[in-house]
């Protein structure tokens, strides 16, 4: 097995780091790539505006998921849990001990490669790993990296691979943090990473979460989702916008409700109950409420209290899962958008998708009917609100 180790302060991890990681994984045909944020970097002191280690780990995890190398790229906390400074030789030794028969590659940028001989125990690292250095241009490789490669080979018997990055992103972490403080820098970051920075107020970023632009809210919403959930939520947003235009609802309001409709979806049952206590939500018989139904209740509270959404949008989030009798236009739009967005493929939605743009109430009736029948066929409990919503529509259309 071929294993890559890519360490760094990652303060924050940006598109340059991600491009290098992806290219190395593909070029070297790595079976595993570990992204290792440093706890206490030995070569420099962390700046006052640095994010805490756990926040940096969260951002690196998001970046690793965004690489979309399932089973290959993984963020790990090895150096965060180790006491003292984060020395690379200790990390390499630990990986070698775990994978004694596998080939290890240590990935690093040009600056780190050129100072490798000054690291702690470079000879131990060179004995365990092939060094993989990223060059900015072919000229860099020949003029700058080649002499160092020859020196390290002679001094430490090091094996070295030099790579020229095809999609170079020129930004230093120091400059990026400055841009973030100035309200810029999003272009250098994965959208979920940027959203988490906004949401947590990292690197001196101070945004009023109740007054976010639509794009910033989109990034924040994405940061609150499991990576696999992002396409669904973005699909729901676009479908809600189209339905809003078709039926005369407020498109911006529909987009904001759609973006946040699953904002607490990934939380565990215990975390959902904690949110209920935090926002003083009185849930009747919570022990009998299915976990998947909690997120509509807690998501609505977060949308209102944290992000300042309108009462209409909050209500649309609250009822997007079970529905209820006599729903508002926006409630119907979010319910249907969640049901029929393009990534949904759990059943044949052809007729429901057609009706959604031709007869909204008939689409709602079909949606509730399908949902109730599907749950009953699976032997699952049907929420009374869904039955009441279906029966209400039957009554007004009789």
Image: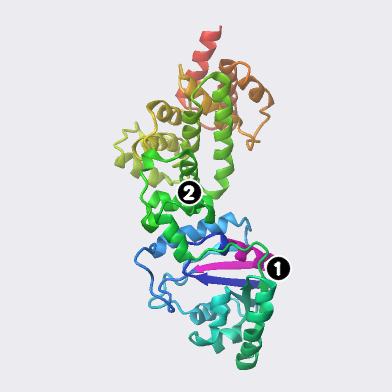
> Which x, y percent locates residue 110?
58, 75
Q: Which residue is mark 1?
A: 27
Indicate whether 46 appears above or below 199: below
Estimate how packed mark 2 is, as few (under 14), some (14 to 19) or many (20 or more) residues with alpha carbons within 10 Å: many
Measured as percent of width and height from the top left, residue 275 is found at 35, 42
Q: Secondary structure at mark 1?
A: helix
| Above or below for 80 versus 246 | below
Q: Dot 1, crowdedness within 10 Å: few (<14), some or many (≥20)?
A: few
For residue 296, which quarter of the picture? top left
Residue drawn at x 50%, y 42% is 215
Q: Nearer the viewer, residue 268 or 117?
A: 117
In magenta segment, residue 24 = yes
Which residue is drawn at the image coordinates 65% and 76% (left, top)?
140
Residue in the foreground of this view, choosing between 44 and 286: 44
The N terminus appears in which quarter of the rendering? bottom right
**Image position of 252 (left or right of 278):** right
Residue 102: within the magenta?
no
- Compared with 264, 135 (above or below) is below
Name the colour scheme. rainbow
Give how far across and how far down residue 66 sits, in percent: 58, 54
On the image, the x and y values in percent for residue 285 come to: 35, 33
Badge count: 2
Range of residues picked out in magenta: 18-36
Residue 380 visible in rendering: yes
Q: Which quadrant would the C terminus be assigned to in this image?
A: top right
**Side (left or right) of 103 relative to 74:** right
- Disc 1 to disc 2, how far (Cα)? 29 Å
* Earlier residue among tags 1 and 2: 1
Residue found 62% across the figure and 76% down from its top: 133
Mark 2 secondary-structure assignment = helix
Q: Which residue is mark 2?
A: 223
């Amino acid at each position: 097995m071929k294993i890559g180790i890519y360490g760094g302060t990652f303060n924050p991890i940006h598109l340059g780091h991600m491009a290098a990681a992806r290219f190395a994984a593909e070029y070297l045909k790595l079976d595993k790539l570990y992204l290792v944020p440093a706890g206490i970097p030995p070569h420099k002191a962390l700046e006052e505006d640095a994010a805490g280690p756990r926040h940096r780990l969260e951002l690196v995890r998001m970046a690793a998921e965004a690489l979309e190398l399932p089973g290959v790229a993984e963020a790990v906390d090895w150096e965060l849990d180790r006491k003292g400074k984060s020395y690379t030789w200790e990390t390499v030794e630990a990986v070698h001990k775990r994978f004694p028969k596998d080939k290890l590659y240590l990935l690093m940028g040009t600056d780190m490669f050129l100072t490798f001989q000054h690291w702690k125990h470079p000879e131990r690292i060179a004995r365990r790993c092939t060094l993989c250095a990223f060059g900015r241009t072919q000229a860099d490789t020949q003029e700058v990296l080649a002499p160092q490669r020859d020196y390290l080979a002679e001094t430490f018997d090091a094996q070295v691979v030099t790579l020229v990055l095809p999609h170079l992103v020129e930004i230093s972490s120091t400059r990026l943090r400055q841009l973030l403080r100035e309200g810029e820098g999003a272009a250098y970051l994965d959208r979920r990473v940027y959203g988490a920075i906004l949401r947590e107020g990292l690197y001196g970023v101070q945004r009023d979460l109740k007054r976010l632009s639509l794009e910033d809210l989109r990034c924040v919403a994405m940061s609150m989702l499991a990576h696999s959930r992002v396409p669904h939520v973005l699909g729901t947003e676009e479908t809600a916008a189209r339905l809003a235009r078709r039926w005369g609802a407020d498109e911006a309001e529909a987009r904001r409700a759609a973006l946040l409709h699953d904002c607490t979806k990934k939380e565990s049952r215990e975390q959902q109950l904690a949110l209920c206590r935090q926002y003083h939500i009185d849930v009747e018989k919570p022990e009998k409420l299915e976990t998947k139904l909690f997120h509509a209740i807690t998501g609505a509270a977060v949308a209102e209290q944290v992000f300042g959404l309108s009462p209409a949008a909050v209500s649309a989030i609250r009822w997007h899962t079970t529905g209820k009798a006599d729903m508002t236009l926006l409630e119907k739009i979010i319910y249907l958008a969640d049901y029929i967005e393009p990534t949904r493929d759990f059943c044949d939605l052809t007729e429901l998708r057609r009706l959604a743009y031709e007869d909204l109430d008939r689409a709602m009736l079909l949606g509730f009917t399908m949902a109730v029948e599907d749950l009953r066929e699976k032997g699952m409990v049907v929420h009374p609100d869904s039955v009441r919503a279906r029966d209400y529509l039957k009554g007004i259309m009789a």
